[in-house]
Image (tube, rainbow, N blue to C red):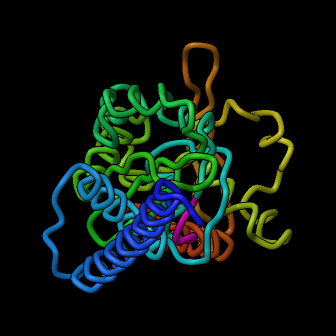
């Protein structure tokens, strides 16, 4: 015959099993209830706050990336703000590596650089070890700059009004230009990079008609700073002027080009986003 203590032990074990089963049943029930009302429960507390911020960030990144589109071009050199606008007129989106962007930003000078992005913002992002590249595109009214990490995740973004940026940049470029005192070239000056990009896209015959002696471009090299195209033509000829750096000073060189070839060059410049657009030279008697 079994002893009384043994029977009590069995009763206690049986009770514990029943209690554990009830606990599991209650937990499952509560879990199912919480899941059912999850959509209507108020989202409060630190965890919900973090999750909400994360969702907002993901939605913002997804929205920005969707605007970029598939046509993204990587560039390694941007000469100035007009050069940037010209690129964005041809390519909806460009991507620039961190170091190349910083080189471009430093080359703008304090005033132009500050108009594009505040120095404090650039300093802060430059201290971020994850920053690897920049994507840029423009809307009808803004230049959009996205600072991304190595996985293309958004670290910071900046929006600059185009009207102020372009107006001030063009004014800065031309106000002290040596061409501006000559009415033939007023408002018809471009950077060497803009000129050469358009020149390179011409056929060999057109290039020869614009600059018969290509040795000059080789001789000038990086010393070629800017180019101007006369607003007038005569007997099928147009005057081009070249600003050449000579140490701390500048020298102007002029040459004559065929008007039809210059018209093709102007078409290329305008297609690349020349600001302001150039008109074909007007025939004028000498």
For the residue pair 46 and 281, the one nearer the viewer reads as: 46
- The residue drawn where x is 54% and y is 46% is 191
For the residue pair 107 and 146, the one nearer the viewer reads as: 146
Q: Where on the picture, by quarter, is residue 210? A: bottom right
- The residue drawn where x is 62% and y is 38% is 100
Specify whether residue 80 is in view. Answer: yes
Residue placed furthest toward the front: 1
For the residue pair 80 and 248, the one nearer the viewer reads as: 80
Whole-percent x, y for residue 188 in the image: 43, 55
Q: Which residues are magenta?
A: 90-94
- The residue drawn where x is 63% and y is 14% is 247
Residue placed furthest toward the top: 248
- The residue drawn where x is 65% and y is 77% is 260
Does residue 183 appear left or right of residue 244 in this picture?
left
For the residue pair 231 and 22, the one nearer the viewer reads as: 22
Whole-percent x, y for residue 208 in the image: 81, 63
Whole-percent x, y for residue 44 in the image: 16, 59
Does residue 220 appear left or right of residue 274 in this picture?
right
Q: Quadrant of the N terminus?
A: bottom right
Q: Check the image and report above or below for 12 versus 168.
A: below
Whole-percent x, y for residue 283 in the image: 48, 74
């Amino acid at each position: 015959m079994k002893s009384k203590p043994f029977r009590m032990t069995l009763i206690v074990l049986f009770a514990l099993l029943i209690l554990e089963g009830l606990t599991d049943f209650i937990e499952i029930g509560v879990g199912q209830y919480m899941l059912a009302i999850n959509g209507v429960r108020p989202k409060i507390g630190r965890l919900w706050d973090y999750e909400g911020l994360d969702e907002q960030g993901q939605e913002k990144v997804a929205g920005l990336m969707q605007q970029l589109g598939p046509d993204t071009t990587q560039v390694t050199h941007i000469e100035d703000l007009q050069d940037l606008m010209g690129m964005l007129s041809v390519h909806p989106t460009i991507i620039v590596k961190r170091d190349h962007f910083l080189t471009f930003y430093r080359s703008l000078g304090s005033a132009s650089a500050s108009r594009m992005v505040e120095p404090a913002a650039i300093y802060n992002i430059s201290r971020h070890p994850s920053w690897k590249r920049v994507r840029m595109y423009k809307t009808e009214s803004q230049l959009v700059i996205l600072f991304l990490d190595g996985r293309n995740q958004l670290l910071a973004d900046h929006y600059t009004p185009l009207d102020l940026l372009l107006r001030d940049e063009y004014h800065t470029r031309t106000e002290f230009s040596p061409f501006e005192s000559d009415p033939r070239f007023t408002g018809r000056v471009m950077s060497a990079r803009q000129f050469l990009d358009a020149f390179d896209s011409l056929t060999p015959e057109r290039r020869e008609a614009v600059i018969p002696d290509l040795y000059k471009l080789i001789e000038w090299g990086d010393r070629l700073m800017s180019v101007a195209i006369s607003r007038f033509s005569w007997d099928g000829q147009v005057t081009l002027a070249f600003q050449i750096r000579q140490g701390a000073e500048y020298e102007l060189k002029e040459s004559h080009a065929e008007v039809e070839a210059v018209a093709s060059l102007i078409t290329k410049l305008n297609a690349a986003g020349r600001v302001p657009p150039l008109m074909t030279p007007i025939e004028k008697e000498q």
